[in-house]
Amino acid sequence: MTRTLTVGAAQLGPIDREHTREMVVERLVALLRQGADAGCDLVVFPELALTTFFPRWYTEELSGHDHYYETEMPSPVTQPLFDVAAELGVGFALGYAELTADGHRYNTTVLVERDGSIVGRYRKTHIPGHEDDEPWREFQHLERRYFEESNEGFPVWEAFGGRIGIATCNDRRWPETYREMGLQGVEMILIGYNTPIHYAPDPTQNRLQGFHSHLVMQAGAYQNGTWVVGVAKGGCEEGVESLAESAIIAPSGEIVSQTATDGDELIVATADLDWCNDYKNTLFDFDRYRRPEMYGRITSQKGVVT
Ligand code: CDV
């Protein structure tokens, strides 16, 4: 008997500054209901899916954006998502800004099972952008000011009848992200992202945003024999154009479903989790072919040493 998991990538369009959490949760619930109608077991929402992408604005005080963070999950305002998930029997992954009781700020994603219970949460490892005000930019990317790098690594959970992992936006560009989870036998990696089309440090990359996004996720899927679900918050948010092109990618590296718009849109695929073994047990039989003793620099060295 094959193990299948029907997964939905619930792409979001823009969330403006004046949009309340209640308004956003209504959009998420509508997508969750669409997912249920389409037979989904799991619906994946993007990175920072409850608010506008606030790291694009500088505040003198670090606490200047604290109203964009969640101090509890679920909270009274996000509880409806958990309730509807349990009512429909559809799980979800949701990205949000987390402010802990002891004052730490993380870019977090929570994974919720079909009964509304929390499976686990992942805190973003690779934090891109900059720490300080850079007014020369058309818009800023102050993730390094408003989020700490997580030191918790990349957990993989037994859930939804398979082995599920999470990465967040910039994490998807780093091969180590996928391999860390590949080495735990991951079968599906859920990745939410907010990727502005304009990349201030090197605008020659602007036209390649869609290509690069698919390139890294397709390579990560194939090289580790895993499904990858990439989900955007796309469209023009507060004047900033962001990449859509959400995609569900098979262990072969092929895109099996892709969004056609840059707004709220659900795409669905029924993922055969045993397909992963066609890659995990052949070309990427890690146990047989990997040479970890040859890869020492990967964990002992950070930058380039010539
Ligand atoms: N949210 C992100 O992590 N965005 C980065 C941008 C800044 C390059 C990304 O890797 O898409």
Image (cartoon, rainbow, N blue to C red):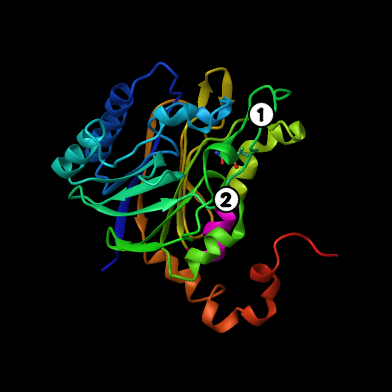
- Residue corresponding to mark 2: 126
Residue 152 visible, this orientation: yes
Instruction: Looking at the picture, tell me which residue is in the foreground, 55 or 155.
Output: 55
Q: What residue is at 42 percent from the left and 43 percent from the top?
A: 103
Q: Which mark is residue 133?
A: 1
Is residue 227 in the magenta section? no
Q: What residue is at 21 percent from the left and 51 percent from the top?
A: 117
Sooner in the amino-acid sequence: mark 2 or mark 1: 2
Residue 63 appears at what percent x and percent y? 48, 31
The answer to which quarter of the image holds residue 131 is top right
The reply, left or right, for residue 199 in relation to residue 189 is right
Q: Within 8 Å: ligand 1 and the Cβ of disc 2?
A: yes
Residue 284 appears at what percent x and percent y? 55, 73
Q: Amino acid at mark 1?
A: Asp
Q: Ligand 1 appears in which quadrant?
A: top right
Classify mark 1: helix, strand or loop: loop
In the depicted structure, whether residue 247 falls above or below residue 139: below
The magenta segment is: 218-225
The answer to which quarter of the image holds residue 209 is top right
